[in-house]
Structure formats: C-alpha cells, structure tokens
Amino acid sequence: MSVLRPFKATDMFKFNNINLDIWTETYGIGFYLSYLSRWPDLCSVQEAPSGRMMGYVIGKAEGSSTEWHGHVTAITVAPEYRRLGLARKMMRLLELVSDEIYKGFFVDLYVRCANDLAINMYEGMGYSVYRRVREYYGSMGVGKGSRDEEDAFDMRKPLSRDLGRRSVRANGRDIIVSAHDVS
Amino acid sequence: MSVAALDRQIKPIYDALDTNSNKSAIVACNKLLKKHPKNQLIKALKALALVRSQKVEESLILCDEVLDAKPTDDAVLSAMMHVLRGLGRHMPDKDMVTMFEEAYKQQPLNEELGAQTFFANVRAGLWKAAQQIATKMHRQFQEDRYLYWSVISAVLQANDVTTPPSMRAILYKLAHRLMTSSPTPSYQNTDRFHLHLSILRELELYDDAHKLLDSDVGKAICSTSLSCNEIRRDIWRLRGLILEEGKLAEARIVDQNDRNWLEFLSILDATFSYLNPSGNSAEASSTPENARLECIAHVARTQELFTRIAQEDGVKDRSAALGLLELEKRARTHKISTDSGRLVTLMQQYFDQIGEKACCFEDLKPYLADLQGEELLKWMSYLESIPSSFTTSKDLRRLINSHKSSRYTLSQSDLTVESETARVTLYLQQYFEGLKLGSNLPVTELQYADDLALLAANVLVNLWKLTSQEQYLLHAVTLLEFALKKSNQSFQSRLILIRLYRLLGAPSLALDHYRLMGIKQTADYLVRAFNGEKYSQIPEFVIFEDRLDSSLQRDIVKMEHLRMRLTHEPITSDIIDMELIELKFIFDRNHHDNRDFEIFANYQPRISDSINAQTSLFGRNESHGWLWSFLKLYIRAFQQGSDLDDTVEEKLLIGDRPKKTHDADKRPPLRERLIQQSEKDLAEVLNQPYLRRTSHRLNIYLQLTQDELLFVNFAGALAEWLEPYHDYTRPPPAVVLAEAAKQTELKTGHPLKGVDLAALNRASSPVKKDEEPPAVTEPPELVTKFFDCEQHRYLMDSVVFILIFSALKARFLEVQRNASPIEALHVATLGQEVRMKPLDLQGKSVDELKGFASLHC
C-alpha cells in the first residue's frame, strides 16, 4: 500500500532514505527543480501512509517528429520497499501521461547492461532493447572493467500513437552507438 | 569605429569572463574604456570582472554609474543582472527591479523587457508589483499567459508572510475575478486548470469547482493529472460527497486496477461517514441508531470488497490486505467491531503473506501500537511460532520481521540487562548465519542479514542507556564497522555509527556536513516554471525556497562555526561588525527545521526513546532553543564591542535584508527580546503538558547542557553589568559614519554618498562626550560567582579570567575522570569561549574594562 502523488519541491527534504542508496544517482537540487519546473506531470513519488518516502520517478518529454517521446530520467525505490511493484505503478503513470498528454510515440529509458534484474523487469512491462550505447555510464563502472557495467541499453516501449511499432526493433542488442550519438 | 568593430573588441572580454580570467577582463575593459569612456556595456562588464575579483567598492561605483544612465540595451541589462547578483543586490533589494522597470518604461512596447521586469519582481518575491506588470502586459500584448501570470502573482501575494491575513481573501477574490475575465477556459491547460481549482477551493466556491470537475474535460484531466485529482478529492470531501467519492474510488480499484492507497482511504472514509458528524453525507441518517446500522452494513460490504481484492492480488499488491486491517481498526474506534479476535487474526494473515517483504514490520506498526493484554499475548505466541532457522532470504526476512515486531511491544520488565544481553547474542548468532546466504552477492548489494546487525546495535545502545557502561557502545561500534565491511552500502549502519562515534568523542563532522544543502538559485527555476506555465509547482517552489532560506540546521552550523572562529582567530572590529549584522538577521528569522531524523533505523520498543533520541549528544537535540540562547548571547556581546548602532548599520549596509513578516511591527523591539531570560524560554517549553511526564524526557527538550546554561547566565549578567560603560564609550553615529566614508575614500578614491565628513573634524576625540560617564557599580554575583568560585576575589581587571580559569580547571578535572572525553571537550570549548568573552568586547573595551576596574579598586 502506497500513496502515489505528485513530486513536490519540499519532498527533497525527506528523500534521504532513497537517495543515500548506491544505485541512486544523486543529482543536485537544481536538477530536480528543473524537471519540476518543466515536466511536473512526469514526476511522481510513492509515499507510505506514515509519510515516509518509498520511491520516486522523474521524467521528461523530448525529441522531434516521430522521435517525440517520454523519457524516464530516474526511477528509484528505497531498499526496504523493493519487490513491491512500486516501480511498475510509477512507470504506468509516466506512460499514461506520455501517451495522453504529450502524445509521444514511445517511452524510453537507459539501464546498465549488467543490471539483469532491471532489464527483466522492464521487459516484463513491455520494453525492449532498441540499441546499446557504448560507455554511457563513463568508464567508472562499479565492476572491474566490464563492458556491461559502463554500457547502457536504450530500452523503448511504443505508445498508442506509434501504430506501426516503428520505435522498436527485434535486433536492438546488436545495434551499437557511441554515447556522443545520443542526447 | 563601426558597431561591428567594437563588438569584435568586446568579444575577448566575454571570453575572459567565461574562463574566469577576471584580471585580463579588467585590463581589456580599461583599454577599451579609454576610447569609449561612455560605453555602458564595457562599464558593466568591468563591474562584473571587479565584483568577481572581490573588489566590491570599485564595482559598486561603476554599477551605480550604469544604473544612473537607465540602460535599455539587452546586453547591458543581462551583464548588470550578474553584477547585481554578485553584489548581493538581487533579492529584496530593488536595484534589479528598478533597472528593468526603468528600461521597460522607456520601451513599453518591448515585450521581452516586460517579461524581464516581471521576472525581476518574481525573483525578488515582490508579488504585488509582479501582478500589476502582468496585468499591464496582458492589456498591451493580449496574450492569455500574462493574465495567468497576474492570477498566480495575486495568489502568491496572498500566501506571502508579509501579507496580513485580512488581505488574503481579498487577493484570492482578485485572482478569481482575473481568472473569470479570461477569454479562453482554464481547462485548455492542466496547470491553468489546477490554478483555477485551487482558487475556487480557497474561496470555498465548491459548487463551481464541482461543476468544472464533473464535466467530461474535467474528468479527463483528473484521470491523467495527479495534482488536479488531488484537488478534486479534496473538493469532494469538502462538499460532503464522501459516499460518492467512495463509489468513484471503488470503480477505479475494480475497473482500472488502480492500487493507489488514496483510493482505499476514500472507501474507508465513506464506510464510516455515517458516524462522522462533519461528514454531512447527502444521505444523512435520521437517528444515531440508524446511522450505526447503516455503517455496520457498509463495513460488511467494504470487508467483502477488500477480501476479494486481497485474494486476487495475493503477494503482488498488499493494499487490500492492509485495507482490511485499517477497516478493523476504525471499526474498533467506532465500537462497531463484532469480533474481538479479528484484529490479531488479520495481522497474522498479513504476516503469513507479507512477512517475507522488508516493509512488513513498518506496515504493521500502527496496529501494534495499541495492542494490549490477551491480544498481545496471542500475537506474541504467534510470532514465537515463526521458525528461527532459515534457508532462503525470504525465510530470513520473515524472521527479522518477527524480531522487530516482538521487540516493539516489549514492556519495561522485559528490558533487563540479562534479557537484552540474551537478545544481542541471539541476533548476532543469526546475523552471522544470515551472512552465509549472501556470500555471493556483489559488493554493491546490501546483505540480507543487515537488519539483524542493526537490531543488535539498537539493543546495545539500549544496554548502554540502562547501565551507562561505555563498553556497550564500543561493542556496537565494532559490530557496525564489521557490518559495513560485509555490506559497504548500508547507509543505515553508517548513520548510527556516526552518532556513536560522536558520543564516544571521536570527532566526525560527516553527519552534519552531509545534510548541508547550500543553493541559492531556486529563483531561476521559478522563472522557468512561469515561462512554461507550470503553475501547479510555483507555490511549492516558493515554500521550498523559504524553507532553505530559513534553515535551522544551516544557522546552527553558522553559530557553531562562529564559536570556533572566535576562539581560533584574532578578533577584529570588522569581524565583530559583520557578524553582528548577520546574527541579527538570523535572530529575526522564522526557522524551519528541515532535518530528517525519521531516517534512522529505529528498532527500540514502543515504550522507550527512539535510537535518535538515545544517541543525541548529551541527550539533547540542538534545535530552536539552543540557537536562540546562543544568538542572544553573541548579539549582546557584539553589540557592546561594536561602534555600529542601528542608524549607522542602516546607512552602511549593502545587500540583502530579510523579508519582514506582516506582524514584524508587533514584535517587541530587539533590545527587549535580547534580554528575555533564557529560563523563561525554557519554562515555556516545560509547560507543554506532554513533557511533564518524566524528567528523563524533559532533558531531551532542554536543549542546553548544565554547563552551557551556566555559561549563558554568566554572559547575560556580564553583559548587563558592562552595557552602560560600552554605551557611553561608543562614538556618536555621525562620527562612525564619517570614519567609514573616509576609509572607503582611501580605498577607492570615491567618498560614500550622503555622509557628512565634517563630523570627524567637529569631534576632537571620538570617545569624549558631553555627558558624565556612568557610575561604577559592583559586578553582579552571577559574574563573580560563576562556576561557584566565591573564594577567589582578585583584582578586577583579572577577575574574570582568573576566576574562570581556576573554576574551569576544577570542572574540567571533574569531567576528565569520565571514561568518555566528550564531556571534557565540551567544558573545554565553553572555557575557551569564556576566555575570549571580555576580548570580544573589542580591544579597546578591554582597556576600558581595566580602567573601570582599577578605578573601582
């Protein structure tokens, strides 16, 4: 049980239990504010009835013509609230808003190639690998020099506007681009 | 020279500024200024390079020259924005606003200038002016968004601390009137719609809001916008449509598989609305008995619904299962529960199903809180049936949840040294066992058994509290250090560890530092939100900025830093003057405590203090009361050491001043507030009924330690005693101002504006006055008896020092015998502060003190 509600600026005073986690990229406050000032409807939090923050998602809308899409910039759930399906609920909302409000063609996200758990989860939600981005996470991967730590999969899920499912492809894992080629 | 040629020559200045080569930027400006002495852009750029090189006075002169010329050129204006910010003149100071307003006045058809003027007011929080400019822009340029800018500016003005409450409704009505004058309906844009609804809600125009929301467009918006739906839910509740809201929620849960807990709460509220007098439900029942019966029937229906969904969802989603627990809890509160064993049965069912999830204990906590007697026994015996051996991480989590739950309901008699020791042993043994399960986890993962180490650490801290034996803290430290070796990313272990090191006197500033958030550019995002018409976020941004601006934690750190600075740096009159001004600002602030103490992994029983309270330094939470006491102490000391009085300060001060709240005039004057007794402040706190229960709890809210309290009282008495002499020796304001102007002129070659230098000549000696010096009086007992050292009566000029040193030494030797050095450090710190106490009354003052003293003897 969790409350799904809009992300507010003052939530930044109490999301420590989420942001102290290693997997969570901790951005500067300006980063969050810039998302809230532009795409507030693509940002949401999950909160326990006690008021404790459980997780949040921040996203944006970008791209031109048929590349116009919703993007998941960060999605994270505090360690004690994992495996409860919270990420799925937040993703569902982001997809809905990307589809109905922004009229995007697809939603996409980046994930470490080594993060099998997350990749499986996203595949379960209807995402598939569109391309592999080399050294997306820099060469500072936590593992020991493994390619999969520093490369990212760009995963996509088509929305209702993409009738021909042109935003996805079957052989995405074999399409390799460099980090400079993606925005 | 052509414009293009000049542009070409200015470009290197921009490049130099971009790379922070301020010196070469200044050189380049000077060269160009020889040929173009009147060029405002070059002047503005030079002012920018100067302010970045800390040459504030020189920059100010150029800045004023450019401002006086009332520039309208885009490049000049944007360079000046940076200059003014660098000079700290961008906040409530009106320079930026004035600059843009002057420019806009000259070019009223320039839409960009209009917008910049609006934003300048937004940045400065001047909502009234912002509202007027937006209205003017709307009339001129006929764009809808300017109308909405003016609407939200009125709303922000209504919410502002400077606005008296009586004006609030008037401003909201203004916002409403502007809103209805819009040629296009608000629902064309989600954020405009949100703004419209929030105004209707504030004005209690619920029917209007309902009509908008009940339309097809309204419904469509709410289905995708969480923020609009939030207001919708509110309005349904305020209109008493609680049953209807319950039905809507049911439809969302059943038809759309929505599992937002808010929907479940709506159903629960509807279920009990018959018994809630404020619920003025449309189908209000005739008699209380009827209401009871209707409610019982509704409870049965809700129970059926939740049971069905809980079965469907299983472990996939726990909302309905918890809904059943909440339903039973509320039924009990209303005394309509029919089955007294049901709550514990539901808890058991919940634990059976969700026990393998890390959040299970936290989910159950609200229902554990009131468990007593028979029920408690039943629950505890259920927990004992949870197997203590495990082969999977799920089993382990279940076991951990059972430990947390049973520990939570322990009674005082269960918390003996023996039983707590036995618990540590058990948790540790299971912890080591549990580590084996995670031996193959990557280093970035948390160990499954981490919470057992945290549980053991909680118990060890409690043992320390029970026995005052530090060995338990050392055990806890060893354990947590080990746990961090195994689970490097366990921030929960790290947080408690930092607290323990602090208690043991091992200096660690990590905790204090990690929470520091120093940013100042919120206003820029505010402007962005206006540009993108994201009105739903704007009021929150303003609140966020205010909470950052008035951060209690930041000012506590500031105070602590000042205390360190004064004991380790030579004290100059500059330091005293600057700090005095800043402390006075801080003193007037309404502080927000943004610290998050909820984050600690607290597994202490419901009857004892939390781990946060247990591990606070000296058992005290440094908070408003502490800051208040030390601010008063230092402001009084600095006031006596400074030549600046309020009139001088007003004239000399450049930069931001804090906003004045609407009731600022009603506050007693600073002087009165400064001498308010700290005991009285504390007494106010003590009068809170919830604090009276135990003296142990009292200590936590008394924010000063005994040693600090003595020091504060001593400093107060000392200040009281010396004040007349310091007031007498302070040079007249005109002389101080003239001296400051002279110094500025020596530094920059330009005098300060509006200061009469003649005052310096008129006063042959700045110290002498016409009036008689105040009579010399005996020092008060609090000063001479500080630290109970009555027997030492030395010559006056050394009395303060020697008394304190001998007394301090005794106190220091006393606390030094403690095992932990932390109290000795605390006394030593205060001792150093006492030592510099007379010194911080400024060099000159020490001589005076001696003078008075020798007179006296």
Image (spheres, helix red, strand yellow):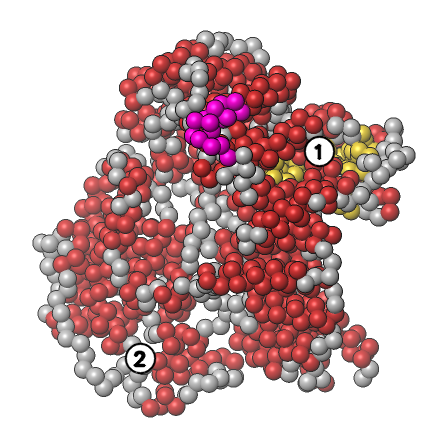
> Which residue is found at the position 27% from the left and 26% from the top?
B467
> Which residue is found at the position 59% from the left and 75% from the top?
B98
| Residue A53 vertical position relative to residue B530 in the rendered view, above or below | above
Give x and y (percent) for residue B780: 15, 62
Q: Residues within 10 Å of mark 1 (few under 14, many from 20)?
A: few
CA separation in Å, label 2 and label 1: 71 Å
Q: Is residue B536 left or right of residue B553?
A: right
Region in magenta: B284-299
For residue B854, what is the image quadrant?
Answer: bottom left
Q: Amino acid at mark 1?
A: Arg
Which chain is indicated by disc 1?
A
User: Residue B731's mark?
Assistant: 2
Q: Residues within 10 Å of mark 2 (few under 14, many from 20)?
A: many
| Residue B597 vertical position relative to residue B104 in the rendered view, above or below | above
- Magenta residues, dominant SS class: helix
Query: Label 1 belongs to which residue?
Result: A92
Q: Is residue B805 left or right of residue B382?
A: left
Q: Quadrant of the C terminus of chain B?
A: bottom left
Q: Amino acid at mark 2?
A: Pro
For residue A149, what is the image quadrant?
Answer: top right
Q: Is residue B779 left or right of residue A67?
A: left
Label 2 residue SS: loop
**Residue B171 is a magenta residue:** no
Which chain is indicated by disc 2?
B
User: Residue B574's mark?
Assistant: none
| Residue B597 vertical position relative to residue B678 in the rendered view, above or below | above
Q: Nearer the viewer, residue B235 or A10?
A: B235
